[in-house]
Image (tube, rainbow, N blue to C red):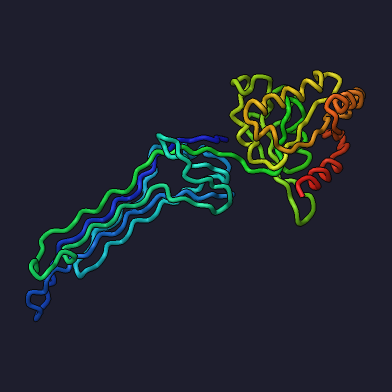
Amino acid sequence: MFRDEAVIKVRAGRGGRGIVSFRREKFVPRGGPDGGDGGRGGSVILVADPGKSSLYDLAHTPVLQAENGKPGGGGNRTGRSGEDLVIPVPVGTLVYALPRGNLLKDLDRPGARVVVARGGKGGRGNARFATAERRAPRFAEEGSPGEERELKLELKLIADVGLVGLPNAGKSTLLSRLSAARPKVADYPFTTLAPVLGIVELDPSRVLVVADLPGLIEGAHQGHGLGDRFLRHVERTRLLLHLVDCSSTAPDPVESFRVIRRELESYSPVLASKEWIGAATKMDDPAGEEKARALEEALGRPFLRISSVTGRGLKELLRALAERLS
């Protein structure tokens, strides 16, 4: 199940305690203290993993805890350090520290990592406290506790192209034609309830990552429909592809386009200023050409003509995307 937000608690491991020990060997009188230090507690580390696509698993784990350090031993032996807890998260995860909400790290590339809770130091054994005046200390330190934090994780998918448009504009059908992704396709609104990524091969050496986002409706930035909760994923894209339904049963394409632009502007001026390409969809309908021309005249820029059913214009669309992104 897709989930792009999670609040988690992390707890690093406690340091191992130091040991009180004295050297006792034959023919070694007054051997002296030899208690070793405790091991360091394990830290909690978040790592961006390309194999992860959702925060669902983390949202249902109450506390994520690293291993405690082990106690020291006699003979000045240091205890074993606790294992670090390495937590894989999707690439594009932002890590915030609560309650203030400070951004700790943007894990925006595979392998990026951040230590969110450091393990406690191991306690010192009694050998560390021996001095000329205090030759047989009979005390040692306890290990210090590890850091404990509450974090908010927020996922912003990273893609080259983001598909935007009203519900039933043809986004899911287009993605299924261009890639191996299989989003739900049906003739009713809101078939896409969560973002879907597809890999589109331009040539053997180059691919595009395309994100299909749930359809927007007027008032989405105020919570209408599915709201604007998925618009954060568009912020990561390099290019927007505006899809406008130009079939005979579709509403006015000019107003449809302007509804989407208003929602993008209401959500974020930066998002609204992103570069975009327009495409008139469902051009297998006889009424499509007239509506597409009206759209171009009203907006003063060209729109590609495509039909995901017949395949019309899909090669030209890919060529345009590749040229714009290069």
Reply above or below: 136 against 166: below
Q: Report x, y in % for residue 269.
A: 65, 31
Residue positioned 81% across, 22% down in the render = 254
Residue positioned 72% across, 35% down in the render = 163
Q: Residue furthest bottom?
A: 27
Q: Report x, y in % for residue 315.
A: 85, 43
Q: How many marks?
A: 0
Q: Report x, y in % for residue 50.
A: 59, 49
In the image, is 127 to the left or to the right of 236?
Answer: left
Q: Pick whichever, 98 or 42, lies toward us.
A: 98
Reply above or below: 135 against 99: below
Q: Specify whether residue 228 is in view.
A: yes
Residue positioned 25% across, 59% down in the render = 38
Q: Pick whichever, 52 or 263, lies toward us.
A: 263
Q: Specify whether residue 190 is in view.
A: no
In the image, is 213 to the left or to the right of 295?
Answer: left
Quadrant housing residue 197: top right
Q: Report x, y in % for residue 131.
A: 12, 68
In the image, is 228 to the left or to the right of 323?
Answer: left
Residue positioned 70% across, 37% down in the render = 274
Reply above or below: 26 against 227: below
Quadrant housing residue 138: bottom left
Quadrant of the snapshot with the N terminus: top right
Quadrant housing residue 149: top left
